[in-house]
Amino acid sequence: MNAPSLSPSAVRREREKTERRAAILAAAEHVIVARGFAEASIDGIAREAGLAAGTVYLYFPNKESLFQELLGSKVQRLNDAVAAETAKARPLENAVPAVVTAMFRHFEEHHAFFEIFVRERIEFSRGAANSNPVFSRIEEGTAHLAAWLAEAQRRGEIGRAKPMSLAVALRGLVFQFTRDWLRSSAQGRLTQHAAFVSTFFLKGSAA
């Protein structure tokens, strides 16, 4: 039996909710980047979004949950960028630099947001109950890399270390370079390190 379709008014309400939620998230990112997480407030985010604070609370119970939603969206975009590169058929020696470049480019494009972590020493675990979806997305991204590297192992293109260990190592290299770049106030292009990171990883994983 087909599910009953929504009335036009219900469809409109759902669309308005989606648009309002997106507006709140966009306002939250703007305020957090401009003022810092510690100084951001629900009232300030509501003003930026052109909404009453009570409306924001209908969607998010506190600014921590807002921050986690923003972080989760950034992690998902990173996963999507990596998945787009790993889906292309090519030798691993060409694929790894493309994957690393995609990851670095993501952090370049969103560096203002990620600089908050360095400036305020924010950990991914801030607000433990809200951080689980973020960790799930991080784990999904690592698992995807591990599966991709396992395929390369079956083709004899990489050493026999555990694929998950290789995936963690690759992401760790990218994150370490990104962290150092952010600490230097994002000077220069992060993507310029892609060749070095890729070569270092491929040589280290050859055994």
Image (spheres, grey):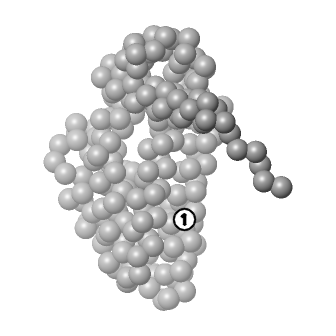
x, y percent for residue 68: 53, 33
The answer to whether 125 is drawn above or below residue 74 in the figure is above
* Residue 82, image quadrant: bottom left
The residue at 40%/16% (across/down) is 50
137 horizontally vs 35: left or right: right
Q: Amino acid at mark 1?
A: His
- For image coordinates 48% across by 32% down, the residue present is 19
Q: Outermost residue toward the left?
A: 188
The furthest residue to the right: 1
Residue 87 image offset from top left, x and y in percent: 45, 73
Label 1 belongs to which residue?
144
Q: Nearer the viewer, residue 21 or 79?
A: 21
Query: Which quadrant of the figure contains the N terminus?
Result: bottom right
Classify 197 as above or below 88: above
Name the residue at 42% across, 66% down: 84
Q: Is residue 50 visible?
A: yes
Q: Residues within 10 Å of mark 1 (few under 14, many from 20)?
A: some
Q: Position of residue 123 (x, y in %)?
A: 49, 34
Circle 1 SS class: helix
Report the quarter where the C terminus lies: bottom left
Left or right: 15 with respect to 46?
A: right
